[in-house]
């Protein structure tokens, strides 16, 4: 089985609710880690690496509604985190404001308040369950990608009356 991979799905800034968008769909758990899933991970890695400042990408963003994502805050091979069927065990720590962007809404960003520490279980590409604990920016990116799997965007978490603003230059990592 192989996926036909479209380009990045985008949201129109004039329709942030975008309830009809595939991006609003909940992603399904991966049933078996086979060559198609490995191919999908490779494609996510390739697409993410091709985007300057990209720090994370969920499969749904390229039109595949499966619980798979790549997080790579430092953009090195060693810092890559593969998320497959992630299960959040705890989100804790300080509430921290960080400016977030999304590859599905280029050139926009807004300050989002999230907890600073996340612990989660995820599958490796070998099918083993592993537990990860991450803090700071990586914890933000992981929460952002897990949100994508639930059909949520960072702007769903903004305070009333705020919305993503156009940024002049993309200098922040975006997900
Ligand atoms: Zn995003």
Image: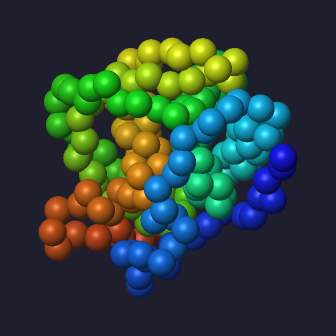
- Which residue does the image show at 77% across and 32% down from the upper left? 34
Residue 126 location, x and y as percent? 69, 18
- Which residue does the image show at 17% across and 37% down from the upper left? 95
- Which residue does the image show at 82% across and 34% down from the upper left? 35
Who is closer to the viewer here, 118 or 63? 63
Q: Residue furthest front?
A: 31
State left or right for residue 119 relative to residue 128: left
| Whether residue 41 is situated above or below residue 27 in the rendered picture | above
Who is closer to the viewer here, 147 or 49? 147
Q: Quadrant of residue 77?
A: top right
State left or right for residue 90 relative to residue 28: left
Q: Residue furthest bottom?
A: 14
| Whether residue 66 is situated above or below residue 158 in the rendered picture | above
Q: Quadrant of residue 70?
A: top right
Residue 115 seen in this snapshot: yes
Numbered label tally:
0
Residue 140 location, x and y as percent? 37, 38
| Whether residue 40 is situated above or below residue 74 in the rendered picture | below
Residue 148 seen in this snapshot: no
- Colour scheme shown: rainbow
- Which residue does the image show at 65% across and 61% down from the upper left? 63
Who is closer to the viewer here, 169 or 40? 40
Residue 172 location, x and y as percent? 47, 48
Residue 21 location, x and y as percent? 51, 73
State left or right for residue 129 relative to residue 42: left
């Amino acid at each position: 089985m192989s996926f036909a991979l479209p380009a990045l799905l985008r949201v129109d800034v004039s329709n942030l609710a975008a309830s009809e968008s595939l991006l609003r769909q909940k992603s399904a758990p991966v049933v078996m880690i086979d060559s198609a899933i490995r191919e999908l991970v490779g494609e996510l890695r390739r697409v993410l690496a091709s985007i300057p400042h990209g720090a994370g990408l969920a499969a749904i963003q390229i039109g595949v509604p499966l619980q798979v994502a790549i997080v790579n805050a430092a953009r090195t091979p060693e810092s890559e985190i593969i998320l497959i069927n992630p299960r959040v065990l705890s989100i804790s720590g300080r509430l921290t404001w960080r400016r977030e962007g999304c590859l599905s809404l280029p050139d926009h960003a807004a300050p989002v308040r999230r907890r600073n520490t996340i612990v989660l279980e995820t599958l490796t590409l070998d099918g083993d369950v592993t537990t990860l604990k991450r803090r700071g920016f990586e914890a933000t990116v992981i929460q952002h990608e897990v949100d994508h799997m639930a059909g949520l965007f960072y702007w769903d978490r903004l305070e009333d009356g705020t919305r993503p603003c156009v940024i002049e230059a993309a200098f922040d990592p975006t997900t």
